[in-house]
Amino acid sequence: MALKSKVLVIGLDGVPLSLIRAWAEEGKLPTFRRLMERGVVGDLRSTIPPTSGPSWSTFMTGKNPGKTGIYDFLYRREGTYSFPPVNASRRDGVAIWKLLSDQGRTVGVVNVPMSYPVEKVNGYMISGWMTPYSAQDFSYPQDLWRELRDEIGYYTIYP
């Protein structure tokens, strides 16, 4: 019989682990303190370039920017001087939640940068940064955004 283990991954963008540890020990982040005491926590070795866009794509796929093709939040459209935003459709590589989902695991993905457009998964998915402001297809299942709206008000990806 296969082991049924649950995993929670929390990614915080732009904050050093040293601050999270200090705030947790000072009692400012009691939930993080409990999670760190009971789980696994470690420093991140970032990508080159060490910016959010390529780092999140590397987290998703386990591939470096040279393999995902994502080096920034924008890309230069070939043959032009146009720099449109990058989204998940430009990523070369399969996200970990899709791999797990395809193996029958239930996944929940919330607010991961550059995860728009969302993928059909065994569970739910709400995209994060780089989702167009006017998008209403930022969740899977599609109607999840309506449930969010009805329960907590309009869901805003950007603060």
Image: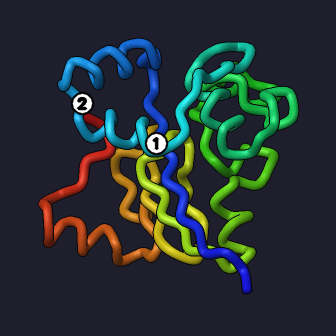
Q: Which residue is mark 2?
A: 29
- Tell me if residue 127 comes above or below residue 98 in the rendering: above
Residue 10: image tag: 1
Q: Residues within 10 Å of mark 2 (few under 14, many from 20)?
A: some
Total numbered labels: 2
Q: Nearer the viewer, residue 41 or 109?
A: 41
Of discs 1 and 2, which sits in the foreground? 2
- Tell me if residue 35 comes above or below residue 53 in the rendering: below
| Res 151 quadrant in image | bottom left
Q: Position of residue 130 (x, y in %)?
A: 48, 39
Give the side of residue 29 with respect to residue 157, left or right: left
Give the side of residue 68 with respect to residue 31, left or right: right
N-term-proximal mark, 1 vs 2: 1
- The residue positioned 35% from the left and 45% from the top of the image is 133
Question: Disc 2 on helix, strand or loop?
Answer: loop
- The residue positioned 64% from the left and 28% from the top of the image is 55
In the picture as drawn, the residue positioned furthest to the right comes out as 67
| Res 63 quadrant in image | top right
Amino acid on which disc 2 is placed: Leu
Q: Position of residue 6 (x, y in %)?
A: 53, 64
Amino acid on which disc 1 is placed: Ile
Quadrant location of the C terminus?
top left
Question: Disc 1 on helix, strand or loop?
Answer: loop
